[in-house]
Image (tube, rainbow, N blue to C red):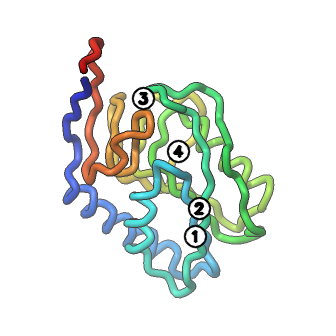
Amino acid sequence: MAVITPIFTEEEIQKRIKSLGAEISAEYAGLESPVVIGVMKGAFCFLADLVRNIKTPDPLQIEFVRLSSYGSATESSGHVQTPYLELPNISRRHILVIEDIIDSGRTAKFFMEYLQDQFNPKTLKIAAFLDKPSRRIVEVEPDYVGFTIEDLFVVGYGLDYAEKYRELPFLGELQLSATTGS
């Protein structure tokens, strides 16, 4: 049986995203042709809400990739999987990567290095809905952070456990009981 204890409400999340959107808008106001890349699946809620709160003179180009280091586990496997990593030519552009969570840092570091090597961006930044620095294994720091959390396994607002709970409008800590029920 799973128990989900709320950590951040829908209202708290939306308030923070509005603030992040204003911060990013200010920093990207003078930049030409910004590209936003969402890391699926976990970032889909954060990306959708965040881009609606980013106001720039040039329209945002939005792209998606699919990367993972969790599979259906509650801890990173340590290996980055790249089931979908196709992008158009975005060379020498201003790129903002949108991640759901940065914990070990492996996926974020892998993707940031990939983008740097493949596209030599004018600027390359990362916005993470959640930052979990206590789990960091490789050095990577997000430029924009929604919330910093302790070492908890969380679901909701796009984050999942075995493809479940993404639809929850809040963020909660998932606790799995050792016994299985009917």
Contact between marks 2 and 1 (CB within 8 A): the answer is yes
Q: Amino acid at mark 4?
A: Glu
Going from N to C along the chain, the mark reached first, 1 or 4, is 1
Contact between marks 4 and 2 (CB within 8 A): the answer is no
Residue corresponding to mark 2: 37
Going from N to C along the chain, the mark reached first, 3 or 1, is 1
Placement of the C terminus among the 4 image quadrants: top left
Q: Amino acid at mark 1?
A: Ile
Front: mark 4 or 2: 2
Q: Amino acid at mark 3?
A: Ser
Q: CA distance from mark 3 to mark 1?
A: 31 Å
Residue 41 placement (x, y as % from top left): 50, 50
Residue corresponding to mark 3: 134
Q: Secondary structure at mark 2?
A: strand
Q: Which mark is residue 141?
A: 4
Q: Residue at x 38, y 73 (%)?
A: 53
Going from N to C along the chain, the mark reached first, 2 or 3, is 2
Going from N to C along the chain, the mark reached first, 4 or 3, is 3
Counting the numbered discs, the total is 4
Residue corresponding to mark 1: 62
Q: Secondary structure at mark 3?
A: helix
Residue 65 placement (x, y as % from top left): 62, 55
Q: Nearer the viewer, residue 135 or 39?
A: 39
